[in-house]
Amino acid sequence: METIADQSQLKVGVGQFAAVNEIEPNKEHIRTLVAQAAEQGVELLVLPEASMCSFGSPLPQLRETAGNNSPSFIRFMQDLARDNAMHIVVGVLSLADQPGDERVTNQLLVLDNSGAEVLRYTKMHVYDAFKFKESDKVRPGNFGAKNSELGLFDIKGFRVGLINCYDLRFPELARALIDQGADVLSVSAAWLAGPLKENHWEILLRARAIENTSYVLASGQTAPRNCGLSMIVDPLGMVLGTATADPGLAVHTLSSQRIAEVRELLPCLQNRRYQVSGLK
């Protein structure tokens, strides 16, 4: 159990909007969300998957976006992070680095409050489900030595693990992040709308929080194509704040004391008898 001196707090925000293929409207949405977050003292802002484009676009459009807009978009995000002294998680596209592979990579970029790039996590599970085939357009991430494919970063005494959209349906990824010390799971998504999909989104987010006794920060693109419903979830599964259907922001202060209390009350990570050694 933590002592009073060990306790940490972190003010977080999850922002949502509907990205389009014209880069300037996306930037304007992001500027607004960052300004709103800064006004509320947010230290870590999570933005959606593929925040620079309409992710359901044909591959040529995605390649054009990744090739022509990605470098300038990343510089734009770095400037926002630095100017607002804020860590930011944002979804970007890049051209695949595998020779002969025409697909793009779907990545989550983490910037620190100086604007420096902390890491890029490449989505491991591409969305080949519900009659959609992301793998036709997106190359999944590769496994690395000692789980180096995982996206993890530290901020103010918290360790944050990254999950990208369809990854959420694979509890072993979340557990692998927890095994690497994560106590916050950050989910960026463009969660496609459809029958029961909004229910799946909320249920899975709350399940990942409960089974891992961790906070979950979830940001999703909004209608008309996606569900929105960005939220912040407590380690016991309570929704602490949410943005519903429209572009907007939810904010909450995380507490390391809360995590410690929940993990003492519900020691399921200690009590488990099957261990996850990795994703393979």
Image (spheres, helix red, strand yellow):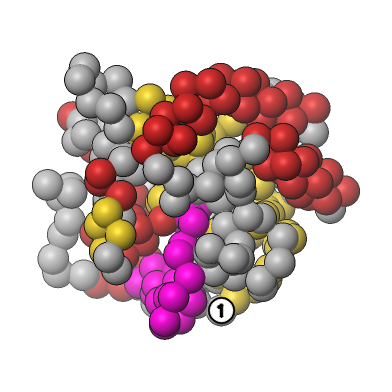
Q: Residue at x 60, y 66 (%)?
A: 223
Which of these two is toward me, 182 or 231? 231
- Give how far across and how far down residue 22 sits, in percent: 64, 38
> Is residue 230 in view?
no
Horizontal and vertical percent position of residue 147: 23, 37
On whether residue 206 falls in the magenta region, the answer is: yes
Is residue 66 or residue 213 the one in the foreground?
66
Q: Nearer the viewer, residue 248 or 183?
A: 248
Q: Residue at x 49, y 56 (%)?
A: 190
Residue occupying the point 61% across, 48% down:
19
Residue 70 seen in render: yes
Question: Farthest right residue?
Answer: 39
Q: Position of residue 61 (x, y in %)?
A: 46, 35
Residue most extreme to the top? 99
Query: Is 166 above or below relative to 70?
Result: below
- Magenta range is 183-211
Q: In the image, is 179 to the left or to the right of 198?
A: left
Q: Residue at x 41, y 56 (%)?
A: 165
Q: Within the magenta stretch, is there residue 196?
A: yes
Residue holding disc 1 = 238
Query: Residue flagged by tag 1: what amino acid is it?
Result: Met
**Count of residue discs:** 1
